[in-house]
Amino acid sequence: MAHTATVPGRSAPTRGRWGLVVAAVLVQLALGAVYAWSVFNKPLQDEFGWAKWEAVLPFEVAIGTIFIGSLIGGRIQDRRGPRPVALGGGVLYAVGNMLASLTSSKDDLWLLVLTYGVLGGIGLGAAYITPIAMLAKWFPDRRGLITGIAVAGFGFGAVIVAPVAKGLLNGTDDPTSVFFPLGLAYLIAILLGASFFRNPPAGYQVPGFTPKTAGRALAGTRVYTLREALRTRQWYLLTAILTLNVACGIAFISQASDATQVIAGASAATAATLVGILGLFNGAGRVAWAWLSDRTGRMAAFIGMLLLQAICFFILPHAASFALFAVLAALIYLAYGGGFGTMPATAADYFGTPNGGAIYGAMIVAWSIGGVVGPLVTSLLYEASGNSYTLPFTVIAIVALVALILPPITKMPSEPGRPQSQGGGTGR
């Protein structure tokens, strides 16, 4: 798309970029509904007689396949622009949800896994990576903050959708029928938001902004392709940092309601309320840590997230006071969300923005690995220790401490401090 924005004296180059932020958040709110899955667990178990692991399986598969969509979608986004990828991925995600409503018997678990898990997960991954890569190109001057806002919508999605889904479930005897109206709502939101997506024009620059040559949050000098990024040790170190941060945080998220009742002695209703409130901290952490990383530097921010989680997990099994437990849980959610808010900006700093969709899209494998391993290890250790959270949470604390060795050794792959090309190439 040709823009007069780059012509001096005419319309401002940055005109309309904040509107793209609103559009991106709308899309992410719909995608973030995946974190509301826990409201379906008991209704599905009651309706079909499934075991707990069977009821959770569609969600686990959705998280496990996200990286497929983000990897493919990220590469296409860099070549064809963000709009077709966001629209295509969003439609696949929404249709997967709607088709999940066809599940009608105990023997249809495979259908729910295929529709909600595989189709929905791949579509989610493609649509998720697109606004992050797009906004990093539009906001070189606020890269950390803006990518934090972009993924905050994802964190807040479950806060909005969970009570809506619960209300729909209360009004029906067929829990899977709820997937159709929800999927339709996701489709409308994604089509509306993604239709505005576009990259900045070639040669795009923010007036008055000069990339830092000193300070903490610096960008590198070189633009990498995905293949080149995969040949650097930094890509693997960053992916490992994100994997461990995800594994620690989601290990608690997967047990939040049960742990609140077992450790703090709260009722099921109180635990459910707390889990809903904690979702706000997941979203807020994505903005807060990303904003902070612009000032402290990316690696200092990750050190802070991992250290905070280590401290909280050591104390958590002994937090019999509900107030103390709630504070520790909120801090864990903040740090968990912070990883997703900060890593997109980190990847853009290290490898440049022109191929950011593919490079960060490949990093999303960290989400799939951490999202499966964290809850699995926690559940196994909980059962092995006689239904106690002391052992699993202490082990997670140790993992977070060990992970602290990674940020200090993750140096920039190219000399920091000089300008990178910020143009998006295609304006689609």
Image (cartoon, rainbow, N blue to C red):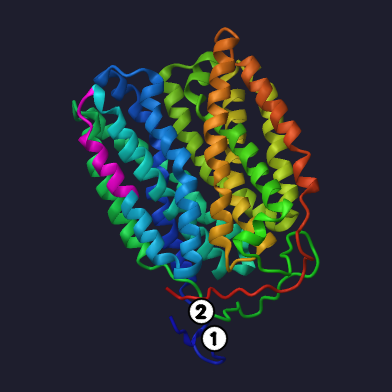
Which residues, given as a range, are shown in magenta? 93-105
> Which of the labelled discs sits on residue 6, or is there none?
1
Does the rendering let one see residue 349? yes
> Main SS type for the magenta part?
helix
Specify which label sits upstream in the sequence, 2 or 1: 1
Where residue 32 sits in the image (x, y, percent)?
Answer: 42, 45
Disc 2 target residue: 201
Pointers 2 and 1 in contact (C-beta within 8 Å): yes
The amino acid sitting under disc 2 is Pro
Give the vertical position of 330 relative to 422 (above or below): above
The residue positioned 31% from the left and 40% from the top of the image is 115
**For residue 160, which quarter of the picture?**
top left
**For residue 225, which quarter of the picture?**
bottom right
Q: Secondary structure at mark 2?
A: loop
Q: Secondary structure at mark 1?
A: helix
Quadrant holding the C terminus = bottom left
